Each structure stands twice: as structure tokens, then as C-alpha cells.
Image: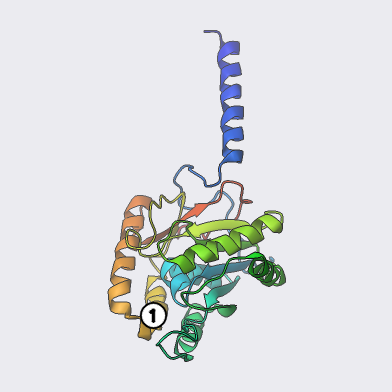
């Protein structure tokens, strides 16, 4: 085979793969510890606005607590956007209270993040035109550079609802912010999750633990044990003591994950 022919086939193959990637809904790219673009230092450059969404208070902390701490340590602004306040509906036998809101506030203080709540009810998430519009306006007001959200096939319905609300807002807002998916209790809740990117949380894991344990009403001893196993597994995969894994949407703008220490 001639060099010209080989070069032509190589170019054709790249065009084909590029086209196929543009059509994919979810990425299946190479594993990497962080994106090629390094996160900017806190001094002298614009602060990034990062939003980590979760179905309930505690979800962002368990899935992304170490990464959140890394961003805030670098001087960036991080908001934890919860779909609900952890309170049940009026028809539930459980009384409504502000315990989980207070716990979320404590967790955010530990991570140096800001709590924000959407107006839905725990276990009764609604996805319709009105709620899509309300959520989009909420994100538009925050003007995020990046949003981290639940994996589309988590077992919990509130997680899937949050994904749908975020994804619709991302589309309606012109795919302008970077979109990443994270995992929670892999194997128990998040299913079929194969990270495309990793963040080293070896140094920030203690703060992640404290933030998760701030949700004292949610039996952190049992839940954190599994999350710690996941962090160690992702660490083995990426060459760190502990890490958090993410999947970047294939059509997402490039965005800097915290670099390896």
C-alpha cells in the first residue's frame, strides 16, 4: 500500500470517528486523569463557576466531595444545587423538618461551597414543561462554566429526574457549559459507569469524609464505606491513592478538571 493511500485512509477514518462522536449521546473516550487544559490558578484569572447538582442533600458530597474541595481550594466558586430539601411530601407519614437543610449547610461550609435548592419534593420529582423551564431559569441565573450531574441510569428516580432537568437546560442553553456525569454508590445506585476522566482526591478525601458525615441523619457509616471503596478503585485505575471518576459528555466544551498533585 502506498503512503498516499495509507494517509488518505487514516484521514477518512478520523473523519468517520469524529462524525460518529458528534452523534453519540454519551462519550466512550480514552481514560485520563484530567483534561488537557489545566485549571487556571486562583490568582490573576477569572474564577470558574462550577455547579454540582444532586437529587438530595448529600449526593454531590458523596459523588464529588473531593473534587469540590479541590476546586474551592484553587479559589473557584462551587455551588451545590439540590433538587429537593430532603423533606417528604404532605401525604408521607414522615414529618417535614429542616434537619437535612442544616446538614447540607454544614457540609457546604466544610467544602467552602454554597448550597442552593430547587423546589421539588423528596421522592416525588416532577419532569414536565413547567419544571424544565423553572430549572433552566435557575441555571441561567447561575451562569455556570461547568455542571456536574447524575448518571442517566442511576436507580433512584430523583437522580434520573435531576439528570433530565440538567440535560434539557444544557440543550436549551446552547450547550455552552461543560457537562460531566458523576457516580454515587456504584453498583448499588449508579450502574454501568466507566469514567473517561479522573480527579486525584488523595489530599481532599478527609474533607469529603467530613462533609458526608455532616449528613448525620442519613447513616453515613453505611453509605460512606461503599463510596470509599469506589474512591480507592478509581484511584487504582488512575494511579492515585484515591480518586473520583467522571464521564464528560462527548459534545461538552473542554473544561479544566483539577490537575494531579
| Image vertical order of residue 98 relative to residue 235, above or below | below
- Quadrant housing the C terminus: bottom left
**Horizontally, is 233 left or right of 9 in the view?**
left
Q: Secondary structure at mark 1?
A: helix
**Horizontally, is 118 left or right of 85 in the view?**
right
The residue furthest front is 91
| Relative depth, front residue between 82 and 62 | 82
Image point (56%, 74%), residue name: 81
Question: From where the camera sits, is residue 256 visible?
Answer: no
The answer to which image quadrant residue 167 occupies is: bottom right
- Specify how the rendered protein is coloured: rainbow
Image point (40%, 64%), residue name: 184
**Horizontally, is 37 left or right of 190 in the view?**
right
Residue 45, horizontal then vertical, whole percent: 68, 65
Question: How many marks can you see?
Answer: 1
Residue 76, horizontal then vertical, whole percent: 60, 70
Image point (48%, 89%), residue name: 102
The residue furthest top is 1
Image point (70%, 57%), residue name: 172
Residue 198, horizontal then vertical, whole percent: 44, 55
Instruction: Report which residue position mark 1 lands on.
Output: 210
| Relative depth, front residue between 166 and 79 | 166
| Relative depth, front residue between 180 and 209 | 180
The answer to which image quadrant residue 140 occupies is: bottom right
Residue 178, horizontal then vertical, whole percent: 61, 56
Amino acid at each position: 500500500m502506498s503512503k498516499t493511500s495509507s494517509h488518505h485512509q487514516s484521514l477518512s477514518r478520523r473523519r468517520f470517528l469524529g462524525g460518529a462522536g458528534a452523534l453519540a449521546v454519551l462519550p466512550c473516550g480514552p481514560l485520563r486523569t484530567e483534561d488537557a487544559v489545566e485549571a487556571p490558578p486562583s490568582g490573576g484569572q477569572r474564577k470558574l463557576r462550577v455547579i454540582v447538582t444532586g437529587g438530595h442533600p448529600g449526593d454531590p458530597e458523596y459523588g464529588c466531595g473531593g473534587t469540590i474541595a479541590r476546586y474551592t481550594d484553587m479559589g473557584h466558586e462551587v455551588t451545590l444545587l439540590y433538587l429537593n430539601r430532603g423533606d417528604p411530601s404532605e401525604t408521607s407519614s414522615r414529618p417535614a423538618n429542616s434537619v437535612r437543610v442544616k446538614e447540607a449547610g454544614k457540609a457546604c461550609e466544610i467544602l467552602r461551597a454554597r448550597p442552593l435548592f430547587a423546589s421539588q419534593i423528596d421522592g416525588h420529582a416532577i419532569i414536565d414543561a413547567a419544571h424544565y423551564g423553572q430549572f433552566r431559569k435557575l441555571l441561567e441565573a447561575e451562569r455556570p462554566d461547568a455542571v456536574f450531574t447524575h448518571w442517566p441510569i442511576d436507580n433512584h428516580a430523583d437522580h434520573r429526574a435531576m439528570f433530565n432537568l440538567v440535560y434539557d437546560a444544557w440543550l436549551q442553553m446552547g450547550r455552552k457549559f461543560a457537562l460531566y456525569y458523576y457516580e454515587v454508590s456504584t453498583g448499588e445506585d449508579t450502574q454501568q459507569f466507566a469514567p473517561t476522566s479522573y480527579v486525584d482526591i488523595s489530599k481532599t478525601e478527609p474533607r469529603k469524609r467530613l462533609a458526608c458525615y455532616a449528613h448525620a441523619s442519613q447513616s453515613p457509616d453505611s453509605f460512606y464505606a461503599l463510596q470509599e471503596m469506589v474512591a480507592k478503585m478509581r484511584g487504582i485505575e488512575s494511579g492515585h491513592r484515591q480518586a473520583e471518576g467522571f464521564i464528560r459528555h462527548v459534545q461538552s466544551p473542554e473544561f479544566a478538571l483539577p490537575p494531579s498533585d
